[in-house]
Amino acid sequence: MEQKEIRFRKQRDLGQVMSDSFDFLRQEYKPILRMIGIYVLPFLVLYAGVQVYLQKNVLVNIDFSDPEAMMASIKPLEGNLFIFLLFGLFIQSLLVGTYFSYLEAYVKFGKGNFQLSDISSRFFSNSLMALGAGLIFTFTSLFGAMLCFLPGIYIANTLSLMFFIVIFEKQGIGNAVGKSWKLVNTQWWNTLALNILGLILWYAVGLVFSIPSIIIGFTGGLNAAVSGSPVDYPQWYWVLAGITSIISTIALIIPYTFQAFQYFNLEMRENSGEE
């Protein structure tokens, strides 16, 4: 069956944003996954390997019978954990920059009118913009959460479109912050619902692939707590944990797609004078 081009610049309700997002992912998943596989996957594999390494070092050295020894074994990893979190932010920015570069080309040139080689030169610069936006988003959301939980949610939701705006409009992070704040506040609850649904779907994808790890992890931890001995997981557990980490990260394109369609929905409403 011939696939039709999906028009992004269009007003949509909540259901249409979701359905058109899935239609787009269903039509374009092959070039999207190929692009992610070439430009993002190597870093994702490294990220997953570091994650597994940290988990193994924590779990192997835990002595459940001695709380003080347990905390002492975790403390040396605190510095490495901070570096790991920064690396995770870099990975997410790389995924955002790469995926939104594809969406940008799709919107500006049309379906089938560009090759991955035509947009690959933009990945690095777009990822840098996404990294800058990510740092501002993270710090402002954490600051709001430190004041109270609700301000953190408000700030995170209100700034959720800034990643796509900074890449698509290319007018700086300051413009992206202001534009996201302005657009989202015209349909704040609608945008919040989309973000929550996107995160639920992302979490569900990761949960499905992590069920075997959860089962073996729970039983292994329970046995270790009863016997007082360190946890000893089989090698396949760590391999599966790494694969799950990779798949979960790639699945972030689901909420990212929701945000892109919501941006155009709100932009078209603003231009037409509707809310």
Image (cartoon, rainbow, N blue to C red):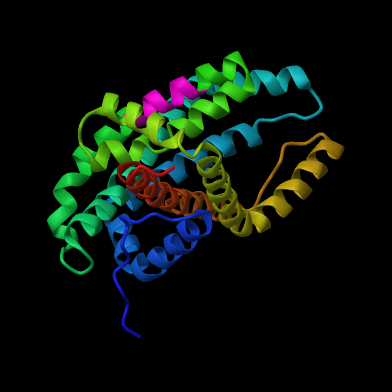
- Stretch in magenta: 133-141
Query: Picture quarter containing residue 76?
Result: top right
| In the rendered image, the vertical position of residue 21 relative to residue 46, given as above or below | below
Number of disc labels? 0
> In this view of the protein, which residue sits in the foreground, 245 or 78?
245
Identify which residue, 216 or 208, lies in the foreground: 208
Measured along the vertical axis of the image, is residue 181 above or below residue 7?
A: above
User: In the visual, does 227 lie left or right of 196?
Assistant: right
Identify the image quadrant of the C terminus. Answer: top left
Q: Which residue extends farthest bottom?
A: 1
Q: Residue at x 19, y 60 (%)?
A: 116
Q: Residue at x 17, y 45 (%)?
A: 122
Q: Nearer the viewer, residue 96 or 70?
A: 96
Q: Name the dominant secondary structure of the magenta segment.
A: helix
At horizontal 53% and vertical 59% (from top left) the residue drawn is 15
Report x, y in % for residue 189: 56, 39
Where residue 217 appears, x then y in whole percent? 70, 47
Residue furthest to the top? 147
Location of the N terminus (image quadrant): bottom left
Report whether 22 appears left or right of 125: right
Is 187 in the magenta?
no
Q: Give the x, y percent position of residue 176.
A: 30, 31
Q: Is residue 114 left or right of residue 220?
A: left
Q: Could you tell me which residue is drawn at 47 percent across and 25 percent down?
A: 80
Please say whether residue 140 is one of the residues in the magenta stretch.
Answer: yes
Q: Position of residue 263 (x, y in %)?
A: 37, 45
- Residue at the outermost right position: 226
